[in-house]
């Protein structure tokens, strides 16, 4: 029995309905679907978990909410706090892209940029939260967050009429874990292909070690997938039989991001293109006739980096 | 009795099914929908009309197809010709953006860049087509082209469950005319808000004059909406009671394009943002509760022009 269930995802869907977008699905060729979650409010799926965590808490303290983030989770918490009219304090590491820091400021969040990587910013946020009493909204390792992200999985199954496989990127693992729960009631359900950059293999190493272990963090997607260790909740769910872990190179991620724009007119950040890289690079090859949904999950990027002239 | 009917649009939908994408609809706020036609093959709706024209012709001549275009129609004809395995010759004016010329080359089309504006390229294409016997695929003023573009209207009504109003950009008028036919069987049907740049008012002037008249062509959207005169078929349809003509400034188009990226993570070309500019600028203001679909219709642009840093 896991700490989060399909029923929690259904409850989250009711809770956040009307606050998040039902992002569209595009069938780019027969049986191959893009879930365009990068069109979500705040530019990523993270707002689903943020709203679910905040609305599950009952009343929020005067000190509001606090979060540490590579950027996308912070943007989501800041967005949700703004909509709900509460204070948001966001800790981001120095690796966070200027686009994301600027976005946080525009949403009125109180920003502290500290630490080389996510885990250091997270430590500082935990210390600060203990002082202020603000509600901590974790980037991935809280049941309400996992359940909120899982609502993407519910939508994928409804919008596609069902798929055999969902391909999704993994950082801390909350999104992939939520989708695993959201796409099925029990052991039966679509295969979850969990794609990670070779340079941030949190799930891959956890599966080898039999538990979450620290990994080195680097590469083009580090500002969004840069957790140093898989979440405990995510491990419990992603170590199940439906999940297949694959790795992709940074070059494959860059190429997938370019193809998403050049062929499909979708502007994703590197992390948002990682899942598609899993397919394009051949790290995962669907069988003939297999119905596959690829989650394109983040767009907090500068489009200038896709210049064509 | 017009030369093109709702039934022609239904027939077109059957003909081009599987060759064009059913582009997604995103409800960005309650009752406000984006039809994301800019995610279409070749980066615009034009491929719908191109396929319908080519497939309606029966067998195609050895000399293939020929078209004149500000860019998007040429890309669509080149794309359709490649899929159908026939030769494509495309005439573009000098105003055509480098992005579009490069795209035509990548699709294997034979390109001639000639004339200052679209109408001059069109003359050259007509002369050349008379010599080679290639099938002419007009950018807007052919029944099969209007019917093909109209399939977008069918999808809008199905995907939204019905709207009161469709907001769409007008150049030569084929797309707006097709959508007018596609969204309704007869006189009753959604209002069509036809948005034009102030600097290319082909419909606005035609409605004033009681017939299509030449207009001066200029401004940021000229490479896609730069017809010098409304099509005759389009006039017949767009002079009906369901259509409301509004004008927007270039500044409003630029602002709408920036908002589409900053808030909605959609990268449109200027012409593709013109319809949304009609709403954002207040040129058309929906009533409370009015259900509105905005067609975002083209993405053949360099994302570098949306640089945020």
Image (spheres, coloured by chain):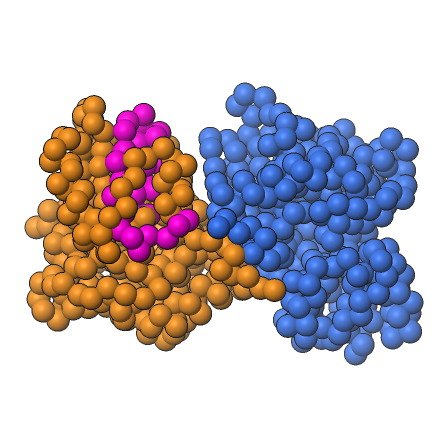
Chain colours: A orange, B blue
Q: Residue at x 17, y 65 (%)?
A: A215
Name the residue: 59% across, 60% down.
Answer: B41
Q: Residue furthest top?
A: B288
Most foreground residue, B31 or A229: A229
Whether residue A276 sits left or right of residue A199 in the image: it is right
In the image, is residue B83 part of the stretch drawn in magenta? no
Instruction: From the viewer's side, name the closer residue of A56 and A114.
Output: A114
| Left or right side of B183 for A64 | left
Residue B39: percent from left, percent from top: 55, 54
- The image shows residue B289 at horizontal and vertical percentages of 52, 23
Q: Does residue B99 sit above or below B146 in this rendering?
A: below
Image position, residue A270 (x, y; %):
39, 60
As displayed, is residue B58 above or below residue B158?
below
Q: For residue A203, which quarter of the picture?
A: bottom left
The residue segment tinted magenta is: A72-99
Q: Is residue A65 above or below residue A204?
A: above
Above/below status of B159 relative to A301? above
The residue lying toward the viewer, choosing from A110 and A9, is A110
Residue A48, position in %: x, y?
A: 30, 41
The reply to whether the magenta stretch includes residue A78 is yes
Q: Residue at x 28, y 58 (%)?
A: A225
Tell me: A69 left or right of A5.
Answer: right
Q: Is residue A121 left or right of residue B183?
A: left
The residue at the point 60 percent across, 25 percent down is B286
Q: Is residue A41 visible?
A: yes
């Amino acid at each position: 029995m896991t700490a989060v269930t399909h029923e929690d995802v259904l409850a989250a869907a009711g809770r956040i309905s009307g606050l998040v977008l039902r992002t569209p699905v595009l069938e780019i060729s027969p049986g191959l679907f893009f879930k365009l979650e990068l069109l979500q409010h705040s530019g990523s799926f993270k707002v689903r978990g943020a709203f679910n965590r905040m609305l599950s808490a009952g009343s929020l303290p005067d000190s509001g909410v606090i979060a540490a983030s590579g950027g996308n989770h912070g943007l989501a918490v800041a967005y949700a706090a703004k909509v709900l009219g509460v204070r948001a304090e966001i800790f981001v590491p120095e690796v966070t892209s200027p686009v994301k820091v600027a976005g946080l400021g525009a949403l009125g969040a109180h920003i502290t940029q500290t630490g080389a990587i996510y885990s250091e910013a997270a430590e500082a946020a935990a210390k600060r939260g203990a002082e202020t009493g603000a509600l901590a909204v974790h980037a991935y390792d809280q049941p309400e967050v996992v359940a909120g992200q899982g609502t993407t999985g519910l939508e994928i199954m409804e919008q596609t009429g069902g798929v055999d496989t969902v391909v999704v990127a993994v950082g801390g693992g909350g999104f992939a874990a939520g989708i695993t729960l959201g796409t099925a009631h029990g052991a039966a359900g679509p295969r979850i292909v969990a794609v990670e950059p070779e340079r941030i293999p949190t799930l891959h190493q956890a599966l080898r070690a039999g538990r979450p272990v620290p990994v080195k963090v680097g590469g083009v997607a580090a500002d969004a997938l840069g957790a140093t260790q898989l979440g405990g909740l995510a491990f419990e769910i992603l170590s199940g039989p439906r999940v297949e872990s694959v790795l992709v190179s940074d070059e494959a991620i860059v190429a997938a991001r370019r193809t998403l724009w050049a062929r499909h007119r979708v502007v994703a950040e590197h992390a948002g293109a990682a899942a598609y890289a899993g397919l394009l690079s051949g790290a995962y090859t669907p069988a003939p006739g297999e119905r596959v949904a690829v989650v394109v999950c983040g767009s907090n990027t500068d489009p200038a980096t896709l210049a064509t002239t």
